[in-house]
Image: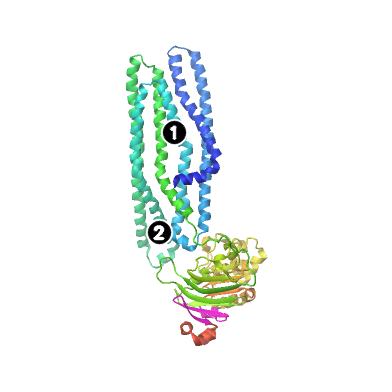
Amino acid sequence: MLIRLLRTYLRPYHRSLALVVVLTTVQTVCTLLLPTLNADIIDKGVVRGDTAYIWRTGGLMLVVTVIQVVFAVASVRVGARVAMAFGRDVRAALFHRVTGFSAQDVAVFGPSSLITRITNDVTQVQMLVMMAVTMLIAAPITMVGGVVMAIREDAGLSLMLLVSVPVLVGAVGMVIIRMIPQFQAMQVRIDRINLVLREQITGIRVVRAFGREPHEAERFDGVNRDLTETSLTAGRLMAVMFPLVVFVLNGSSVAAIWLGGDRIASGDMAVGALIAFLSYLIQILMAVMMATFVVGQAPRSTVSAERISEVLDAEPSITAPVDAVTELEGPPSLEFRAVEFRYPGAEEPVLCDLSFSVSAGETLAVIGSTGSGKTTLVNLIPRLFDVTGGSVLVNGVDVRHIDPEVLWARLGLVPQKPYLFSGTVAHNLRQADPDATDDQIQQALVIAQAADFVAAMPGGIEAPIAQGGSNVSGGQRQRLAIARALVRRPDIYLFDDSFSALDLATDARLRAALAPVTAGAVTVIVAQRVSTIVHADKILVLEDGRQVGMGTHRELLESCPTYAEIVASQDTAEDAA
């Protein structure tokens, strides 16, 4: 998975990567030249007392050093830009894939896990790319070049590399094998801690209202401790690698000096050659150490790449057909034909055998007890879920055959939990229509009974809105969400319990203002209050996902015991009317 991910998203930057290889090669060659030049200064300059040779060779070393520094800076700069671009592209691909998911697809992964994959997992792979282009490319060049130069200095002494390098690679390999399962567990525990933290932040008022702070603190402490223990285990293993490298490096240096001293004493080796050999030995083992750091990051990046690929490879369960309908003709209409829906793995359907139709200018109200399937019914229309039986038709066309963009452009949805984005009032309303004018926004606010409180906010329609609309009340959020749907002026309005936070007077004024706006559209209202839907053209009564009544308010009072019971539970039938 890691190789495939790197190959896919680094392919556009192959020229930059080739440039990094060239720059790194020049830098490494310069680095390998310096010990030889230093050895020449000692053996041909210092030993012979040739000051001129020392100055000439020293000047050459200075030039080589400047070239090395310039090419090193250029290499790191280009490599860093490639790594950052890689991370940007992968995050963008994940974002576009997730935004194409249905609610069902998001539930499979979980919101917390998706957030971790888009942020933490991408960062892990991006870090590997960064380390690879800045260190891993130089490592093999240094190792090969260092071995060649070491043999050139003294072939006999170079035999010790046959021991040092395999010992180092074997020791590091054993550590890495033990690290892989720890990194796999770590990413799962990061998902878990994000889930718990997200729940606690979102439900902070519930936690405080019921005095559950100690319980939630203990719950968070448990998942936090699990992550800490896993991280410490992985950290201990990583901490072992560096001392191993240093031990082998220092042991090899001691052995080289010991053996080299004997060869110098016997006249088989010059002092400068021994110093150069030591430099090459250190460069070779340092290259192995750099490769070790990259390899140490590889297990965690591999796990992250697998998690990223799971999302990128997941096909959305709700997609547009190849020959999708791109134009809907005629007046708006909505029809359910023998619709059935059950959630994956559920034994019983949530909705069963629903059949009704709504024409332009008509209002369909949906009412029923909690859990009767009202919200699920609304979610089937914009294809947040697909029916498992029957069909939902818009303008006589099955929604599964309509291009999703075309379908969504015809709908104005006000969800049960209205959500506002951070920004301004105007920014939130233009989510429905980016080209909406200020006058259109003001008109929508007036109809939604939101103009007064928006005008009182500092800046009016440019007043700031906090994330989720936390700086406005529940009723204000609902009215702004309704205004957002009105800005689009869709063919089908879907109000999913969108009046529950409004008082009766505001509810009545809002419904009166909506009447002329929705006169030529299809309107579906899910409500709990009978007073909200009493004047609807059709009222659909649901009980356990089944249609138990359909008609006007008065017709249902006489023919539907379930509806009559709902009315009686809220007050007398006359008061509700």
In the rendered structure, which amino acid carries the disc numbered 2? Val
**Which callout, 2 or 1, points to the residue nearer the camera?**
1
Magenta-drawn segment: 529-550
Q: How many marks?
A: 2
Residue 399 lies left or right of residue 1; in this view the side is right
Compared with 413, 540 (above or below) is: below
Question: Which residue does the image show at 38% across and 62% down from the upper left?
Answer: 213
Q: Is residue 532 magenta?
A: yes
Question: Which residue does the image show at 53% across and 24% down from the upper left?
Answer: 63
Q: Is residue 429 magenta?
A: no
Residue 209 lies left or right of residue 330; in this view the side is left
Relative to the observer, which residue lies in front, 107 or 217?
Answer: 107
- The color scheme shown is rainbow
Which residue corresponds to mark 2?
A: 196
Q: Quadrant of residue 254?
A: top left
Report x, y in % for residue 576: 52, 84
Which residue corresponds to mark 1?
A: 139
Relative to the observer, which residue lies in front, 502 or 57?
Answer: 57
Q: Would you call the spot at circle 2 few (<14 residues within 10 Å), some (14-19), or many (20 or more)?
A: some
Q: Quadrant of residue 200?
A: bottom left
In the rendered structure, which amino acid carries the disc numbered 1? Ala
The answer for how far apart the CA atoms under marks 2 and 1 are is 42 Å
Q: Secondary structure at mark 1?
A: helix
Report x, y in % for residue 19: 54, 35
Report x, y in % for residue 216: 37, 61
Report whether residue 243 is seen. no
Residue ranking furthest to the front: 323
Q: Where's the C terminus, which quadrant?
A: bottom right
Report x, y in % for residue 343: 44, 67
